[in-house]
Amino acid sequence: MPSFEKKIIASILNRIREDRRTPSTIAPSESDQRAEAIPAAKVREAKISDYHAVTELKRRWSLIPDGFENWEKLWVRNPALAQAEAERPMGWILEAGGSVVGYLGNISSTYFYGEKILTAATAHGLVVDPLYRSASLSLSASFFRQKSVDILLGTTAVEAVGKIARAFRSDPLPQPDYDTVLFWILRPFSFAQAVSKKLKLRPSASRGGSLLGSMVIAADKVLRRRWPKSASPQLSVKVIKVNEIGEDFERLWDAKRAERPRLLSDRRPATLRWHFEIPGDRATKRLFCCFRNHELEGYLVLRHEPDPGDAPRRSLICDMLIKGDRTETIEALFVAAYDDAKRAGSHIIELMGFPASIRQTFLSRNPYQRKYPACPFYFKAIDPALHKELSNEVNWYASPYDGDATLMP
């Protein structure tokens, strides 16, 4: 391992040790004996045949594993791999004593930046047995060490993962409001009931709290007009299936790329179909297309999450592509998505990310807002000049479509 990476790992481990405020409860002799009993761990590239071991590792730590079909989709049928000039790892395994004790996936994708076609990789699904957490940094080092890509991404980063990304010279997405989720409450009483259930209130308090809460939410919704405007009569919106994505999407994609240089994840028809056809997905996806005189002006993908049981049910706007980011097209698609989410029984509809020109239209419809505890999106361009360009917010079109956020069932 290069000396620079060794220094990074050492500095992170030192920081972790410094942050510990309580002494160990294990006597030195017992600690030494335990250390001797733990087999040394080594990193190697992941293989398709590691599926069952990784699945067991995830289940052991209460993480939802991929189905084998989705595993194959990501690392065998991925269009970005077919276009790659060099072979790319599907991830890395931390192995000790013949057992898999850690894993980090590596999802390939294609980006367009003006006339440039760029390759990207997204870190995915980091999981490590507790006894080997310190060695998990070698998995991150393997991810950041790969040379066959132009951009390295982390799109579902929690605070601890974000610190590791910064240590390997990644930067947060230069969009200060990317960590702010906009949402609208669709059914005040049902939403208030779900919140009461999540808070585990007593039945009597739950009934009263739900009724009072729903009245407050309903009144606030009316006073602040927290819903979309009516759609323009010059536009029509149609729902299609993912497998019906056709040539009109190619023309929309070409028009969007021609507007100005901006980093865009590949949205050509074949890639869109691959992206949103997720084996074993329990969520329902709806694809809304907006037309003017039979010409596709834009689309919106809405994901109705399955019932979580003890929390409000959500519908998520996971992708949009709009000619010129036109307000009336966005409004028409939002009206259709809002109504569909309500019919689906969702309590809220959410939007995260997208550039300011699109967010402004949604902000004008008076959403509620909540923030993530830390920035969930980090990037590192291998070329320092490209990294500097991407440090400017105007050069991004970031949304849940990027990375792995909308690729999982």
Image (cartoon, rainbow, N blue to C red):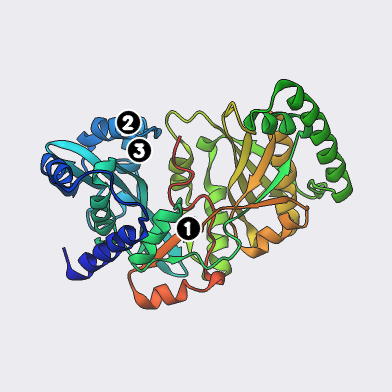
The residue carrying pointer 3 sits among few (fewer than 14), some (14 to 19) or many (20 or more) residues within 10 Å by Cα, namely: some
User: Residue 60 — which label?
Assistant: 2
Cα separation between marks 2 and 3: 24 Å
| Residue 154 can be seen, yes or no | no
- Residue at mark 3: 73
Res. 74 image quadrant: top left
Q: Is residue 133 left or right of residue 362?
A: left
Compare residues 326 and 56 and report the one nearer the observer.
56
Against 305, residue 371 (above or below) is below
Residue at left 74%, top 33%? 192
Q: Which badge, 1 or 2, comes first in the chain's sequence?
A: 2
Question: Marks 1 and 2: which is nearer the front?
Answer: 2
Res. 30 image quadrant: top left
Cα separation between marks 1 and 3: 23 Å
Q: Which badge, 2 or 3, comes first in the chain's sequence?
A: 2
Kind of residue at disc 2: Arg
Decide: marks 1, 3 in contact (CB < 8 A)? Answer: no
The residue carrying pointer 2 sits among few (fewer than 14), some (14 to 19) or many (20 or more) residues within 10 Å by Cα, namely: few
- Residue at mark 1: 377
Q: What element carries label 1?
A: loop
- Where's the N terminus, which quadrant? bottom left
